[in-house]
């Protein structure tokens, strides 16, 4: 896949100001029917395109094999699922000194 990307040579704000200025100058010269107005506009366009830092990016992608990871937790903490929850909750609340017991 090939695409066109830009890496501006000058800051983007400065490039934006130059584009606006070039458009205003070209429009003014076209309205005034000045000789070479279209050539001036074309020269501005080429210069601004060069300052925009065009890059032709070619990407080569290859498909990866499908991989699935299955994780099984067999630690002691997972073995407590069948134990009642209330005693564990009370035990954890009593281990915290600033917790007030309101059960």
Image: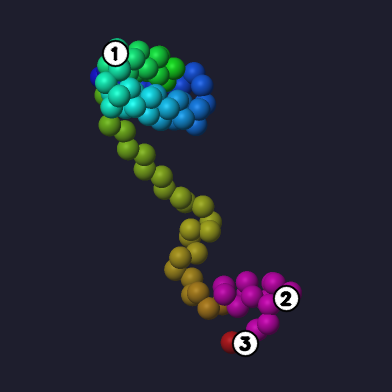
Q: Is residue 92 left or right of residue 85?
A: right
Q: Let me know if residue 99 is in the magenta part.
A: yes
Task: Name the spot of residue 7 as percent of width and height, x first.
Answer: 44, 21
Q: Disc 1 designates what residue?
A: 35
Going by the picture, which residue comes out furthest to the right?
Answer: 97
Going by the picture, which residue comes out furthest to the bottom?
Answer: 103
Task: Name the spot of residue 45 as percent of width and height, x first.
Answer: 34, 18
- Say which quadrant the N terminus sits in: top left
Q: Where residue 84 is drawn, which disc sits there?
A: none
Task: Name the spot of residue 68 as percent of width and height, x first.
Answer: 32, 38
User: Which of the pair 77/54 is nearer the observer?
Assistant: 54
The kind of secondary structure element at disc 2 is: loop
Q: Disc 3 designates what residue?
A: 102
User: Which of the pair 22/67 is nearer the observer?
Assistant: 22
Contact between marks 1 and 2 (CB within 8 A): the answer is no
Q: Distance between the Cα atoms at labels 1 and 2?
A: 85 Å
- Say which quadrant the C terminus sits in: bottom right
Q: Is residue 98 left or right of residue 33?
A: right
Give the vertical position of 25 relative to 71 (above or below): above
Q: Is the residue marked by circle 2 packed among few (<14), some (14-19), or many (20+) residues within 10 Å?
A: few
- Which residue does the image show at 34% across and 27% down from the upper left? 28
Question: Does residue 35 appear in the picture of this structure?
Answer: yes
The span picked out in magenta is 88-101
- Which residue does the image show at 46% across and 50% down from the upper left? 73
Q: Is the residue marked by circle 1 packed among few (<14), some (14-19), or many (20+) residues within 10 Å?
A: few
Q: Distance between the Cα atoms at labels 2 and 3?
A: 13 Å
Q: Disc 2 designates what residue?
A: 98
């Amino acid at each position: 896949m090939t695409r066109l990307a830009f890496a501006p040579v000058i800051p983007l704000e400065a490039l934006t100001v130059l584009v606006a200025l070039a458009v205003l100058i070209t429009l003014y010269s076209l309205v005034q029917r000045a000789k070479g107005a279209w050539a001036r506009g074309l020269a501005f366009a080429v210069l601004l395109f060069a300052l925009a830092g065009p890059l032709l990016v070619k990407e080569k992608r290859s498909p990866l094999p499908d991989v699935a990871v299955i994780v099984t937790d067999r630690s002691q903490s997972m073995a407590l699922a069948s134990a009642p929850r209330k005693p564990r909750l009370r035990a954890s609340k009593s281990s915290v000194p600033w917790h007030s017991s309101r059960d």
